[in-house]
């Protein structure tokens, strides 16, 4: 039957042809994907191919599971390593910043006017602008000055200056 032969030839599904006698060859045998001598042999081929397909699928599934596990472990290790590197870098930055802040704090403490006052010195400011007096030449008789001590201050009037 020509329509059967054409349908077998066009079939997207694999076709096993088995008419029933090994000596007979039909047109469907020529266009089929596989020719079997008998229907029993065709069944064996189909079952064997199914078993091979199941085995192949199981093998692919196992290899995929192993690949995914390996991929996961690799990236887990990479993320852990990056996290550790970041943590180390942040700790180093925090420690170096703490040292730098300690150094700046020590410098500010050394430059503090309170340190000067604590050693028994005083700070004199010309009034009304409160400009620190570093040289007696900026003062003249009757100028008012404010003298700051560690504890308290005194407002004074200049009577005389010496250069």
Image (spheres, rainbow, N blue to C red):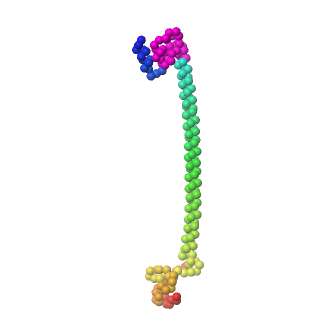
Q: Residue at x 58, y 35 (%)?
A: 66
Residue 70 horizontal side relative to residue 139, left or right: right
Residue 25 picture location, percent across and down: 49, 11
Residue at (54%, 28%) from the top-left corner? 57
Number of labelled discs?
0
Q: Quadrant of residue 121?
A: bottom right
* For residue 91, side relative to residue 141 (left or right): right
Residue at point 55% right, 20% down? 48
Which quadrant of the view contains residue 70?
top right
Compared with 33, 141 (above or below) is below
Which residues, given as a range, are shown in magenta? 15-44
Q: Position of residue 80 (x, y in %)?
A: 57, 47
The residue located at (47%, 82%) in the rendering is 126
**In the image, residue 124 above or below residue 107:** below
Whether residue 134 is visible: yes
Residue 43 position in % (x across, y down) = 53, 16
Judge whether residue 27 is colored magenta: yes
User: Within the magenta stretch, is there residue 30?
Assistant: yes
Q: Is residue 46 above or below residue 119?
A: above
Whether residue 124 is visible: no
Give the x, y percent position of residue 10.
43, 20
Which quarter of the figure is the N terminus placed in?
top left
């Amino acid at each position: 039957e020509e329509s059967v032969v054409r349908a077998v030839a066009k079939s997207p599904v694999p076709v096993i042809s088995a008419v029933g006698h090994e000596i007979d060859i039909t047109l469907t045998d020529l266009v089929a994907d596989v020719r079997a001598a008998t229907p029993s042999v065709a069944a064996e081929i189909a079952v064997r191919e199914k078993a091979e397909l199941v085995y192949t699928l199981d093998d692919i599934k196992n290899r995929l599971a192993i690949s995914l596990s390996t991929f996961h472990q690799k990236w887990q290790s990479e993320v852990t390593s990056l996290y550790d590197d970041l943590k180390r870098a942040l700790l180093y930055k925090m420690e170096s910043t703490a040292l730098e802040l300690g150094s700046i704090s020590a410098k500010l403490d050394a430059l503090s006017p309170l340190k000067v006052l604590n050693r028994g010195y005083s700070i004199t400011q010309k009034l009304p602008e409160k400009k620190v007096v570093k040289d007696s030449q900026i003062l003249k008789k009757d100028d008012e000055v404010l003298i700051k001590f560690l504890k308290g201050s005194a407002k004074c009037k200049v009577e005389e200056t010496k250069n």
